[in-house]
Every structure is written in C-alpha cells, then in structure tokens.
C-alpha cells in the first residue's frame, strides 16, 4: 500500500510540473531582442544562421542562435549574451572582457578561446587546449580546471 501511495504521489508531482517545463520553439532572427540582433551583426555578421529558438520558462525566457558552422550564442531575455561557443577559430576578441583578454594574452598567448560563459557569479573561459578558467565579477582568476 505504501508503494502505491508513493507511485501515485510521484505521478501527480510529475504531471504537475509538466506545464513548467521549457517551451523551446523556433523563431526568426528578427524576433530576437534588439541587443541580441546588434550583437550578432557586430560579431557574427558574416556567418549564416542555421536556426534561432526561444526557450520560455515559468518566469523567464532565453534565446539561442546556432550557425551552420556549428557555433552558437545564447542570450538572456534582454538580449545580453550568456554563452558564446565556436567550433573552429576563436571567440571574437571584442566579446571577451579586457581584463580577461589581458590575462589570456600574458599567460596563454596564441591559445584560441573556444567558449565563454557569463552568469551572475562571473565568467568561465574554455580554451582550445582543454583548460577551463573561471573568473569572478572583478575579473580575478578563481579556478583553473585541466
């Protein structure tokens, strides 16, 4: 009897959370927030967009744009970038904050940046050689993963 109650409670919980799950749907690039469109034109204007999506959450939404070469950019609801990832080459230098760029130039010259993530705690930078560097919001290095 106890198992049946646990199973029923689990099913009700899952059924109750189902509407809260993300609503990921394709959109046109023109439907992105203005800041996101400007960012794409400035840094990725020569790349062909494969698709763009909006991911609706309970109280928030974010956007993702993928390019035909496999690169992608994620934006928050205001169109500010959250993550930039390139498959070949390096992240455009203008995207990387100056203090982080200076650190990379001094310590990892000629090592391309493949991904940069930003959130409320700081930045994570992934290099082509596999290193992952974490910086706080004051651009101080706080962690290196090999």
Image (tube, rainbow, N blue to C red):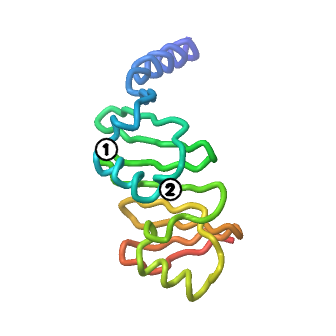
**Nearer to the camera, 58 or 88:** 88
Mark 1 / mark 2, whichever is N-terminal:
1
**Nearer to the camera, 130 or 19:** 130
The span from disc 1 to disc 2 (Cα, nearest Å) is 16 Å
Considering only vertical position in the picture, is 140 above or below 77?
A: below
In the picture, residue 130 is in which quadrant? bottom right
Secondary structure at badge 1 equals loop
Residue 126 drawn at (x, y percent): 60, 65
Secondary structure at badge 2 equals strand
Considering only vertical position in the picture, is 95 above or below 11?
A: below
Residue 141 drawn at (x, y percent): 49, 79
Residue 77, numbered circle: 1
Density class for disc 2 (Cα within 10 Å; few <14, some 14-19, many ≥20) is: many
Density class for disc 1 (Cα within 10 Å; few <14, some 14-19, many ≥20) is: some
Residue at image coords 35%, 47%: 37
Is there CB contact under 8 Å for labels 1 and 2? no
Residue 80 drawn at (x, y percent): 34, 54
Considering only vertical position in the picture, is 120 above or below 47?
A: below
Considering every residue shown, the one lying at the far bottom of the view is 106
Residue 36 drawn at (x, y percent): 35, 49
Residue 84, numbered circle: 2
In the picture, residue 62 is in which quadrant? top left
**Is 88 displayed left or right of 27 in the figure?**
right
Residue at image coords 51%, 52%: 46
Considering only vertical position in the picture, is 67 above or below 113?
A: above
Residue at image coords 51%, 66%: 92
**Nearer to the camera, 21 or 12:** 21
């Amino acid at each position: 009897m106890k198992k049946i109650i646990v199973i029923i409670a689990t099913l009700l919980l899952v059924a109750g959370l189902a509407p809260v799950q993300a609503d990921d749907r394709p959109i046109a690039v023109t439907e992105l927030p203005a800041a996101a469109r400007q960012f794409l034109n400035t840094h990725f204007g020569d790349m062909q967009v494969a698709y763009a999506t909006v991911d609706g959450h309970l109280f928030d939404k974010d956007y993702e744009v993928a390019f035909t070469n496999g690169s992608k950019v994620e934006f928050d609801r205001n169109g500010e970038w959250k993550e930039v990832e390139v498959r070949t080459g390096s992240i455009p230098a203008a995207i990387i904050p100056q203090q982080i760029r200076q650190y990379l130039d001094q310590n990892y010259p000629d090592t391309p940046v493949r991904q940069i993530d930003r959130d409320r705690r700081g930045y994570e930078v992934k290099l082509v050689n596999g290193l992952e560097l974490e910086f706080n919001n004051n651009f101080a290095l706080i962690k290196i993963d090999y």
